[in-house]
Amino acid sequence: MNSFSRTRAMHQYYRDLFTRAIHLPEADALPAWLVTEVLNFANPDFAALDDKLNQAQTGLNLEQDRALKLMMGAIILSNVALCGPSGEKSQAVDAENVEKITQCIVEALKLDGNKNYLVAAVQILFRINEINSAVFLISNNLSELSESPVALKILLLICLMEEDFNQAYVIIQQLTENMALIGEDPMALLMVVTAIYKLGGRPDSFIDFSPLDVPDWQPDAGRYSWLIEPVNNNKTTVLVACYGAGFTAHGLPLLLSLFDTNRDELNVHFHIYNSDAGLAQQITGLRNAMPELAISLSSEAVTPGTAANVHYASRRLVFLSHALEKMTTPVLLLEANSLVRKSWAGMEGQLDVKDLLLTWDETAPFWASILAACLYCEGGELSTKYLAAVARFIDRNLQRNNAERFLDQVALAAVENELSALDKMAIGRAQPHTLVDAAHGEDAFSWILAHSGVESEDYRRYKASLLEKYSALIG
C-alpha cells in the first residue's frame, strides 16, 4: 500500500460512514449551538463560523482553547466533503483548504495530543481523502489508537480497498479479540466476513459463505405465480422487481422510459412482491396500452419483516435464476428506480455483450464490486451456472435470517470469485457510468438513484416529462 489509488477513487459514501460522526467531548466547552452546527449539521461555512468560533469563551487554558478551536476549524473546512443529508453531492476539498486543514490538525495535536483529537484527526483526514496522512497518523500512534474502533475500521477499509489482506488479518485479530470494538456495526461485520472469505475462509455468521460449497441445492420455485405469461420472441426482456407500492413510484416511470426509448427493441417483465388483484389489473391495462413491450407479470409472497429492502433487492436475483428456465429471450435485469435514456440496441454495439454481462465497479470494495442494478444474461451455460449459484447463496442466507445490506452484491461478487479463470474471461463487463449512472450523465443507458435515494433535478425533470407525455396511456 503506497499510493492508495483504489482507496482514493472510492465513493465518498464509504468515507462518510466512518467520519460523519466525530466524538469530541472537549467541544462541550463551546456554545451548544455552535457545536451542533459543526458536528451535527456539518455546516461547511468557514467564513461564517470562524469568527464566532474564535470569539467563543471556553474557560480552558490558552493551549487547550487554541487546540480545540483549531480542531473545530479543521472539521468545518472538511464538512464540504460529506455527501449532503438530502442527497447533495460531496465536493472535493481544494488543495488550499487541504493544506489549511492539515496545518490546523498538526498545530492542534502539538498543543493537545489527547486521544480524542488523534481519532478526530484521522477521521478528518480520511474524510477529505488524504489517505497517506491518515495512515501515517495511525501508524505513528498505534499504541494509543489500538483500542479506537473507528481508527481500526478506517484502517481495515483501506487494507481491503488496496487488497492488502495480510495486514487486514492483523486488524481483524485486534477487532475480534475485543468484540466491543466492532459492536453491532453492520459495515464492520461486513468488512470482517468478506476479508476472512478473501483470505480463504468460509464465514458462516452474519453472512454465510458455505452455500458456495453446495452445488446441487436449488431454491423452491413453487413460491412464484405467473400471472401474465412471457412471450417468446427475439427481443431482450427487461426484468423489473418491486413491491406493490413501489410500482407507482418507480416501476411505472421506468416502464414509460422503456416505452419512450425502446418500445420496438425490448419486452418488459414485472416481478411484484405481494401483488394484489388491483395491481395485476393495472399492469394488464398497461400491457394492452403498450402492446409493443409485451408486458408479462409474476408475483411472489414475501414477509420481509424489518429488512424489507434487503429481501426485495436480493430475491430478484433468486427469481432471475428461475426466470431463465421460463423465458427463451435474453434477460436484462434493471433496478426499479432506473429511468432508461438510450436505445438498448445502440448500447449493445458499445458493450462487451456476452452470455453474461456484469456491471463492474473498480472503485468499490469487494462486496460492492458487482452492481445488482443492471445485469444481462442470455441463458447460456455460464450465465445459468453463475446465477444458480447466486440464487443458492442468497436463498440460504435469507432462510438463516441473514438479511444484511449488500447481501445481493456479496453473492454476485463471491460467486464470481469462485469461477475459473476461463469463466471469468468469458464474462462481459461494463462500468456503472455506462449502464446505470447515479451521476445522471447524458451518455448513460439509464439513470439510477444514488445511495441516498434522493432524486436529482435532472432525474425529477425527466421522470415528470414521461408522466406528462404518456398521461393518456396510464390513465
Image: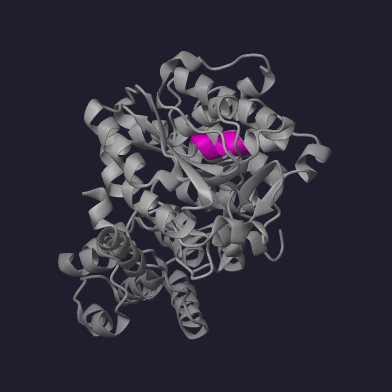
- Is residue 410 shown in magenta? yes
Q: Read off the magenta span.
A: 407-412
Indicate the quadrant where residue 201 lies: top right
Q: Position of residue 379 (x, y in %)?
A: 66, 33
Q: Where is residue 229 in the image (x, y as percent from the top left)?
A: 45, 27
Name which residue lies at 28% across and 48% down.
249
Is residue 313 something that shows in the picture? yes
Drawn side of residue 467 relative to residue 132, left or right: left
Q: How is the image coloured?
A: one colour
Name which residue lies at 34% across and 55% down.
23
Q: Where is residue 453 in the image (x, y as percent from the top left)?
A: 35, 53
Most extreme residue toward the right is 422
- Is residue 251 shown in magenta? no
Residue 106 in the image: above or below residue 177? below
Residue 322 in the image: above or below residue 12? above
| Majority SS type along the magenta span | helix
Name which residue lies at 45% across and 66% down.
440
Q: Position of residue 66 (x, y in %)?
A: 34, 77
Drawn side of residue 415 relative to residue 63, left or right: right
Drawn side of residue 28 relative to residue 207, left or right: left
Name which residue lies at 25% across and 79% down.
49
Indicate the quadrant where residue 298 lies: top left
Residue 71 in the image: above or below residue 209? below
Drawn side of residue 403 relative to residue 55, left or right: right
